[in-house]
Image: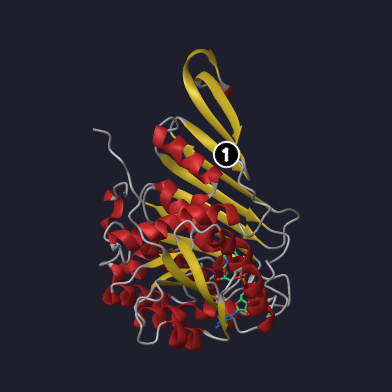
Amino acid sequence: MVAISVNMSRQLRGAVIGYGFIASHGHAPTYLRGNGVKIVAVADLCEDQRRRAQRDIPGVRVYPDHQSLLQAEVGRDLGKLDFLDIATPPCDHARVAHAAFDHGLHVICEKPLATTVEEGRAMLDHAQSARRVLYPGHNYKHAPVVKSVRQVIESGVIGPVHLVTLQTFRNTHAKGVASWRPDWRRDRDLSGGGIAMDHGSHTFYLAFEWMRSYPSAVTAYSSTRSGFDTEDEFGCTLTFPTGMATAHLSWTSGMRKVLYTLHGARGAIRVDDEDIEVSVLEKGPGVAAAGSPGVWRIERGVARSDWMDASHAGWFGSLFEEFRGAIDRREYVGKDAREALLCMQVITRAYASARESSRQLSLGEALLPDSRLFPQALAGDKLEHFA
Ligand SMILES: NC(=O)c1ccc[n+]([C@@H]2O[C@H](COP(=O)([O-])OP(=O)(O)OC[C@H]3O[C@@H](n4cnc5c(N)ncnc54)[C@H](O)[C@@H]3O)[C@@H](O)[C@H]2O)c1
C-alpha cells in the first residue's frame, strides 16, 4: 500500500503587530502566498504603516494598537484568530505576547525575545501555563547556507566541531521605517541594547547548534563610536563544554558580510555570506602544510542565501512551517523558545562582562534559575548532542 502524506493542518489566521520593515518585507511575502495561512488584521501605531498594510494585504482590517485589535478580532469569539506575529521593536514584545496568551493565541515573535531575561522568562512561563506556542524569529537557522553547514556537520566529514568563529559586519545599524523611529536600535529604552541585542540572538543560537551544547562562561567587550547610548561594536568569547566560540559584531565596518568558520578534528567549514568552503585533511600520500601527513581536499560551493536583502524574506516560509509544526504538536515552549531565553541570558551576561573590563563571567549561575528549562546546560561537561 502506498503511504499518502496529507497535511491535516487547517488554515491559520493571524494578525501582525508592528507592520514595519521586517513585517512588510520579510514576513508578508510568505503570508501573501497563502499556503494555509491568512493575515486578517494588522496593528501599527503609525497611520502610514496601517495604510501600507491595507495596500499589501487584500481585505486586512487595521488597528492603531494591539489592544484594540484583540478586542475587535478576538473579543469573546475565540477561534476567529489563531496567532499574533509580533514585529514591533523589542521593548514591546513581552507586553504584546502576554496579551496574546491572555486571549488564547499562539505567538511568533521577532528576535530578540525581549529586552531583559526576566521579561523573557515570564513569556515562556505564560506560554506554558496558557498552553499556547511561543516561537522566536530565529530565521538565520533557515538560511540556505546555514542548512548546507548543517548537512556538512551531520555528514561527519569534519568531525565534531570544537571551535567556531562568527563575525557579522555591517556599515551601519539597520534603520526602521521612516514613519516611526528609524534609529530605535540606538535608543536603549526601545531596543534594550545595541548590536549585541540586535544580532546576538542569531550569533548565539547558531553557536549552540554548531557546538552541540550550551555555554558555561562568557567574556565580552563593547564600545560606541557614535553619540548613541547603545554599543556599535561588540566581541565575546563563549566557553562551551565542547570547546570555544568567539564572535565579533560591528555596525562600523567597511562592508556588509557574515563570515563564519567552524573547526573539527578532521577539517573545517568557512562561510562567506553564501559561499561555503569545506576543507578536509585526508590520509594518504603527500605532505600537507605544517608537516601533517595527508592532503587537503577543498570543496567550494554556493548556497544562494540573499544576505544583502536584510528582510531575509526567502527564509521566513521555512521558519513559519516550524511554528505551524509546534502548534500541531502542542509544543508550547520548545527548544527554540528556550534558546531564545538562553540568548537573552548570554547577551545580558556579556554586557555585565563588558562593564567589568571583560571579566569572565559564569553562565552557569545565570542559568541556574532555569534548571527546569536547561537541564543540558547544567550537566557541565557531560553535555550530550541535543535533538
Ligand atoms: N530576524 C531578522 O532578520 C530581523 C530583521 C529585521 C528586524 N527584526 C526584528 O523585527 C522587529 C521590528 O524591526 P523592524 O526593523 O521591522 O522595525 P521598524 O521600525 O521598521 O518597524 C517597527 C514597526 O512597529 C510599529 N510599532 C512600534 N511600536 C508598536 C506597538 N507597540 N504596537 C504596534 N506597532 C508598533 C512602528 O510604527 C513600525 O511600523 C525587531 O524586533 C527587530 O529586531 C528581525
Task: Point out the residue furthest to the left here.
Answer: 1
Measured as percent of width and height from the top left, residue 376 is found at 29, 56
User: Is residue 363 visible to the viewer in this orientation of the structure?
Assistant: yes
Query: For the image shown, how many numbered marks are present on the structure?
Result: 1
Measured as percent of width and height from the top left, residue 334 is found at 33, 61
| Disc 1 element | strand
Q: Nearer the viewer, residue 118 or 183?
A: 183
Residue at the location (60% across, 52% down)?
A: 167
Task: Point out the residue furthest to the top here.
Answer: 285
Q: 308 left or right of 325?
A: right
Determine the image quadrant of residue 265: top left
Residue at the location (32% across, 44% down)?
A: 5
Measured as percent of width and height from the top left, residue 19 is found at 60, 74
Measured as percent of width and height from the top left, residue 264 is found at 45, 36
Q: 272 left or right of 213?
A: right
Determine the image quadrant of residue 287: top right
Point out the quarter of the image occupied by ligand 1.
bottom right
Q: Nearer the viewer, residue 335 or 371?
A: 335
Q: Which residue is mark 1?
A: 270
User: Is residue 362 visible to the viewer in this orientation of the structure?
Assistant: no
